[in-house]
Amino acid sequence: MESFSIAGGIKNVRKVKHVKLIRKDGTIIDIKVSEIWFSNNKISTENELKLYPGDTLIVPPPFEFNWSMFSALISLLSLSLSVFQVFN
């Protein structure tokens, strides 16, 4: 959690599901953020996921759904169906 804090934090913890920890030797560890943030067993989690020099922590941006694009597509589909109905 200290690493997230030093890096500026995660904007929306509930939307970021996984982060990747790449060890210096190339080992990749996929980490569920909920296991770190909301775990009752923080001591074993912290020891297991300790960062060492050369490690890389990758935090993807949270998934955001573009509702305006969805609305535009639905409107276009509705208009297309209306025109199709008129000509049939």
Image (cartoon, rainbow, N blue to C red):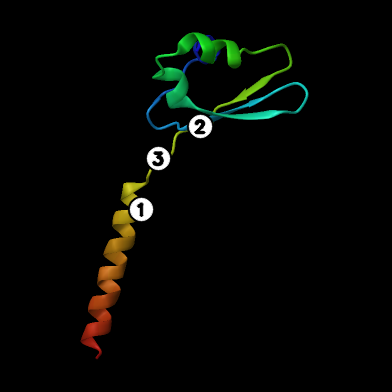
Provide the residue designation for mark 3: 64
Q: Mark 1 to mark 3: distance in Å?
A: 12 Å
Is 30 on the left-hand or right-hand side of 88?
right
Q: Nearer the viewer, residue 16 or 67?
A: 16
Residue 64 vertical position relative to residue 78 in the rendered view, above or below:
above
Q: Would you say the residues marked 1 and 3 are in contact, meaning their CB atoms lie under 8 Å apart?
A: no
Quarter of the figure with residue 77: bottom left
Is 37 on the left-hand or right-hand side of 84?
right
Of labels 1 and 2, earlier in sequence is 2
Of labels 2 and 3, earlier in sequence is 2
**Location of residue 39 in the rendering, given as x and y in whole percent from the top left corner:** 41, 18
Q: Quadrant of the C terminus?
A: bottom left
Residue at position x 75%, y 21% from top? 24
**Location of residue 64 in the rendering, given as x and y in whole percent from the top left corner:** 40, 40
Label 1 or label 2, whichever lies nearer to me, is: 2
Quarter of the figure with residue 23: top right
What numbered label is drawn on residue 1?
none
Provide the residue designation for mark 2: 18
**Location of residue 35 in the rendering, given as x and y in whole percent from the top left corner:** 45, 23
